[in-house]
Image: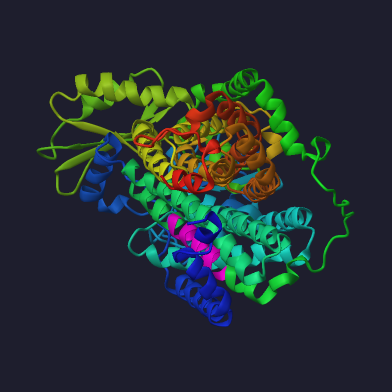
Amino acid sequence: MPTETRRTDGALAALARFCFRRRRLVLLTWVVGVLALAFLGFRFGAPSDNAYSGGDSHSAKAQALIEQHFPDRQGDTLTLAIKTTNGIDDPATRQRIERVIADLTASPVTGPVTSPYEDPTLVTQDRRIARTTVPLTDMDVPKAEVKPLVDIVKDASGDGLTLGLGGDKAEKAETPPQGPAEAVGLLTAAVILFIAFGSLVAMGLPLVVGLMAVLGGIGVMKLVGHLAPSPDFTVLVAVLIGLGVGIDYALFILTRYRDSLHEGDDPERATVKAIATAGHAVLFAGTTVVIALLGLIAMGQRMMTGVAIGASTAVLVTMIAAVTLLPAFLGFIGRRIDSLRLPRRTPRASAAPSADRRTLAERWAGVVQRRPLVAALLAGAILLVLASPALSMRLSLPDASVQPHDRSSYTSHQILSEGFGPGYGAPMVFAARVDSPSTDLGPVVEAVRSTDGIAFTTPPAVSQDGQAAMFMAFPKTGYQDEATTDLVHELRDDVLPGAAGGTEVFLGGPNAGAIDFAEETSSRLPLMITVVIVLSLLLLVLLVRSVTIALQAAVMNLLSIGAAYGVLVAIVQWGWLGSALGFPTEMPITTWVPMMMFPLLFGLSMDYEVFLISRIREEYERTGDTRLAVTRGLAKTAKVITAAAAIMIAIFTTAVLGPDVSVKQIGLGMAIAVLVDATIIRMILVPAVMELCGDANWWMPGRRSRKIASAPPAEVEEAARV
């Protein structure tokens, strides 16, 4: 069967033909469906769940004991930090402090607030710094009701009195929304599309398709949240990835559609050919992204499972939109795809293309192919240098110390660190099951107190049922300090086993929980990477029918992701250009960022691999010449891949404009990875390695060896199908 006939036959071609001819029905179905899903999702969708499980860790066991035996300690709290120039006993200062405490107590979401004037342990010896706890009445107090408390504290500051309100709820309450960042990304994407297509109509189609797909995808994701709860950052990640792939997938199909029109096809035939070729690649690429995202389930974390399912749902909707909604739009637009066109000089036609008329991409491919070993070694060396900082990567969860310095939570952290030590924000909670209320934990408390690095401890408390006891200790170092992590391990491995005398004491608390989460993530990351790579390789082998190319893709993707990790560590953890990119201070990489980045980037890198290699494969089937196929495939995809990568970078970079330091990290890391992938990988490493491999590029077990280029046309088609 001729290649051209196969492209206009089959299930995808039939789907494209149906959507083109029944475009009004398809468009109406999409509009009504998206509106319904958005309404249901935002109205009845599941709330966010930011809890991460500690598995079988020390912190998880400590938390379980506290939840079971100390129900009075389960409520969430805020911390009011007070710093005065004249001391808290100054009459005017005291009046202002007591007014703030009264206002906080009067809130419907808080319980009674103990005044520091009633408890001397809440005040430093010089009486200049004080603190108190603000209990919340409910664990699920919405941040909209906590924001007025932050405003009360901020408004009362000044004239020698500095107040700060800390705590997880306070941090979230004063974190502003993402704002117009996505709009900036969309505007940039529109400019890139207009430059690429030179037409306002062609520019608008990918944007409309992408936006509709993302809106419907988020609606579905929120409804799916009832089955697989996900954290609050999942929506932003879904928007970033959904817009990126949604616009890119439409871009690839639209480019193929315009090429077919320019070759003389009518709009319907051009649509069918575009969906049967580029649409086929889109489905494979999108499936790769979905499989990569679902690899997060291998992490065994309930939170990451929610992210995997939620983000995968958004990508799935964008795939469906690309092969159904876009053909319907093309049915309405037809040959007007180039309407409202940017004026361009049209080159004169010539009888035959000459070497001088080759595109820049073709000339570049020729340069790389003349010195493939040098190009491969140089590109590999650059990638390894970029990846090297990743060897020193530290994982943690952000706390108040890494927030912007104008936040009340950061002010609270600074005051408490100055007055009560930097470890006040990293409390260690020790919990143990006891046989009777008289069980003596004194030796354990004393052993912890005498450990180098501990500032002070609290007396042990026994639960009302007499079955559990707990106490707290505060380190001399802060939440993000590596010394604090070392101290937690020392206490668990050396101090507690020797001092507990047979009683099993568990060390938990927010800091220890973050450490356990980071270590569990590090231990499970290799499994997730293996699952993602194996499944993606199998899918790519099915598409390109080559084991060699699939293995090349896996190695190159790992190199580009490693480079992204390394650059991210240099910027965020080492502080290189960090302040210029909006990071308030040097900080560890947020624990979930690397494991979230890997499947996303591996899937997106496979996208570009699929679109490039599928075009190279088509050229190879026509010519049987690998070098010529690589040159032509690169020439035909360079412009569209560059535009697609630029759109991805623009959208991911918008996350850097937002307020959340963790989201800024993932946006920056993904933008760097896409830049590396679209330049060093696609433009240098791929043509160089394929040139070095030659005919071995197309090796597949069981395939008959033959020189396709020398075979008659019928045999060429038969070999291409094998």
How far across and down, in percent of the image, does residue 633 sit?
63, 42
- Asked if residue 145 shows in the view, the reply is yes
How far across and down, in percent of the image, does residue 424 sit?
46, 34
How far across and down, in percent of the image, does residue 382 sit?
63, 22
- Asked if residue 124 shows in the view, the reply is no
Mainly helix, strand or loop, the magenta region? helix
Q: Is residue 356 above or below residue 51?
A: above
How far across and down, in percent of the image, does residue 684 sit?
64, 29
> Residue shown at 33%/19% (left/top)?
450
Range of magenta residues? 312-325
- Left or right relative to 337: residue 119: left
Q: Is residue 542 above or below residue 496?
A: below
Front position in the image: 280 or 420: 280
- Left or right relative to 501: residue 325: right
> Residue shown at 75%/57% (left/top)?
197
- Does the magenta portion include 320? yes
How is this picture coloured? rainbow
